[in-house]
Amino acid sequence: MTSAPKDVIGGSPPILVTPSPRREKARRRSLVSHWPAILSAVLGLVIWEIVGRASSDFVFASFTASMAALWELTRTGVLLEHVGVTMTELAIGFSIGAVIGFVGGMLAGLNRTFREMTNGWVTISLSTPFPAIFPILVVWFGLGIQSKIALAVFAGFVPVWFNTRAGIVAVDPRLAEMTRAFGGKWWMVMRSVLLPGGMPAVMEGLRMGLGRAFIAVIVGELLASRSGLGYLINLSGQTLRMDQLLATVVVVAAITVALSAFMDRIQSLLVVRWWDERHLAR
């Protein structure tokens, strides 16, 4: 008579973990609910392939040809090099812009005089097209990554500024007064009232600022650059490599989706958990 196999540590039979029926139903329900998006993606790829095969290689490339070009760019390391340049420009530029936007937005939300003094300038920055300001940055910083970093700062700080200011202004001033009445210092008002109250608006500003900064980096690389994804798109167009051009565009779109998912995750951690927990504790 054979005995059941023993666990090495506890001496008990191993436990087979099987997915619960509820989770399986939820997963199937999720797939069913997303069938329009899946169908749309499949139809889009099919149309892309048909149109590409019916067109000249110098006019449009098929999906399979574009994926082959993407694999070649990845295998040779060219794609990784250009992605690294673009993401470096974005990370540095948006980080600086986010700090400027957050600090400036906080000051504008807390001080009416400062808000009225800066409102016009920030509004002009929001409405100024990237190609209009970029030649000035090239003259100042050259064709290297510095000009693209500066453009990312210019593009990224404005939404963060406006949303932070709006979030701080929207906080009920009676809450701050109540905290001060109980002996709370300015940093306690900031930590317990202003930041929790303005956090949803701040996160929305960061989301918008990151998207604008990424667009600005790509535009800057398209206009004047020696590296980066925008430069690779421009080079592919000049050499009539439509397969390589479309492959790079796919990479840009994938990075955009990844950045959006990253901000969704950050927002769920900071707003849904931290913000709600602090308000429930009160």
Image (cartoon, rainbow, N blue to C red):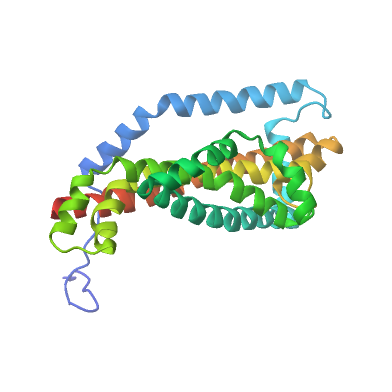
Give percent across and percent down for residue 16.
Answer: 24, 59
Give percent across and percent down for residue 76.
Answer: 76, 56
- 72 w.r.t. 237: above or below: below
Q: Is residue 124 visible?
A: yes
Occupied quadrant, residue 26: top left
Horizontal side of 204 relative to 218 (left or right) equals left
- 109 w.r.t. 81: above or below: above
Give percent across and percent down for residue 219.
Answer: 69, 40
Q: Nearer the viewer, residue 18 or 128?
A: 128
- 240 w.r.t. 196: above or below: above
Residue at (52, 43) in percent of width and height? 158
Q: Residue furthest front?
A: 113
Horizontal side of 119 relative to 268 (left or right) equals right
Q: Residue furthest bottom?
A: 9
Q: Nearer the viewer, residue 91 or 146?
A: 146
Give percent across and percent down for residue 180.
Answer: 18, 58
Q: Nearer the viewer, residue 143 or 263?
A: 143
Occupied quadrant, residue 69: top right
Residue at (23, 57) in percent of width and height? 192
Count the numbered circles shown.
0
Residue at (27, 59) in percent of width and height? 191
Residue at (84, 29) in percent of width and height? 58
Q: Residue furthest right?
A: 239
Q: Is residue 258 visible?
A: no
Q: Nearer the viewer, residue 274 or 250?
A: 274
Report the quarter where the N terminus lies.
bottom left
